[in-house]
Image: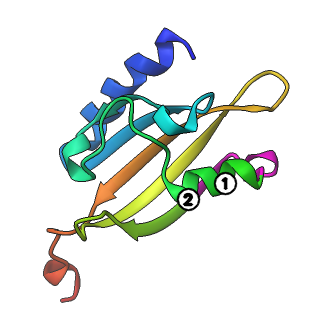
Amino acid sequence: MGRCLFSNISGYYSICGNNYEIVLHDIQNPNSSIIAIRNGHISGRKIGGPMTDLALKLMNEKYYMKNDYVVNSGRTKDGKLLASSTFFIKDENQELIGMLCINNNLTDISYDNYLT
């Protein structure tokens, strides 16, 4: 998918920080699609890991044909609350070749300061 995308993972991490997991997927092999990850401890995933059920659904239903990204929320297997964005990486023919997923771990964030 190109060296540029790999270097962007570190750039996104530098901007976002420790509460963000950043995952790059190569869709050629959904069972081991993770080719780069930062802060994998948030979800417990690592390089060589599979796509999530949601990512598979988006790919199989060709959601990327009419959209460049999707925003959603969910939980990790151990219950962490995530706000997530998935950006679809397409080739020159608009076919999906990868996904960049940015997951914000909201579990330990206090909103008390925002409610006054």
* On-image quarter of the C terminus: bottom left
- Residue furthest front as drawn: 31
* On-image quarter of the N terminus: top right
Q: Position of residue 65 (x, y in %)?
A: 81, 46
Q: Position of residue 79 (x, y in %)?
A: 25, 71
Name the residue at 34% across, 29% down: 47
Circles 2 and 1: CB distance less than 8 Å? yes
* Amino acid at circle 1: Leu
Give the extent of the magenta segment: 62-70
Q: Position of residue 24 (x, y in %)?
A: 46, 33
- Residue 67 in sight: no
Q: Which mark is residue 58?
A: 1
- Residue 69 in sight: yes
- Residue furthest top as drawn: 3
* Amino acid at circle 2: Leu
Q: Tag 2, which secondary structure?
A: helix
In depth, the one of 16 and 22 nearer the eye is: 22
Disc 2 target residue: 54
